Image (cartoon, grey):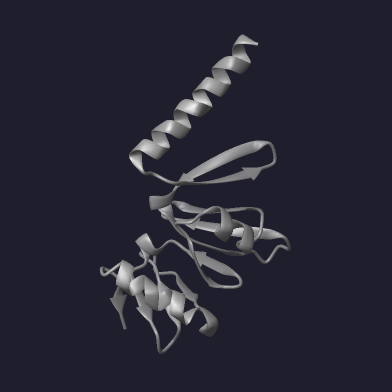
Amino acid sequence: MKRLEETITGAIQSINNLTKSGRKELVYKVGRRINKVEDTNIYYLENSPTQHKVTLITETGSAEFRSNISKISDENDFLVKVSQSCVVNPNNINSIDFSKKTITFPNGDEVIFARSCRKNVKDLLSKYPEINVK
């Protein structure tokens, strides 16, 4: 009981610290292990070639886990859906090329955005003026 109490208290303190600092995290599960990635490290998430899995791309590497883009988009308000198979973190976008319909990240990766999501991408420019437009 004491150990359970300590775990719950620790979890509540962790949640309170996150809300006070304004930091957001993406939480995902691989097997029994729960992983957390701070929002500032996330570039984008896209559907994996493996069915029912998503690939997370960060500044330090990548990870693959079971989920889907719609669920991730709904659960994490700091991510923006740019196609049926991809969500991006607007804080880490280097540039947007509307003629090629691509979004470029600091690591050189490019993601194609859907025509149907063009309005979402244009809205990013007003919220994040540091994004370059090509």
Quadrant position of the N terminus in the picture: top right
Total number of numbered discs in the rendering: 0
Res 127 → quadrant: bottom left
Quadrant position of the C terminus in the picture: bottom left
Name which residue lies at 57% across and 21% down.
Answer: 7
Res 126 → quadrant: bottom left
Residue situated in front as seen by the camera: 84 or 9: 9
Name which residue lies at 38% across and 44% down.
Answer: 23
Name which residue lies at 40% across and 39% down.
Answer: 19
Residue situated in front as seen by the camera: 108 or 73: 73
Q: Residue furthest right?
A: 51
Q: Is residue 59 left or right of residue 73?
A: left
Residue 133 drawn at (x, y percent) = 31, 80
Q: Is residue 64 above or below residue 88?
A: above
Residue 85 drawn at (x, y percent) = 60, 70
Q: Is residue 38 above or below residue 120?
A: above
Q: Is residue 129 left or right of residue 53?
A: left
Residue 26 drawn at (x, y percent) = 51, 48
Q: Residue furthest bottom?
A: 99
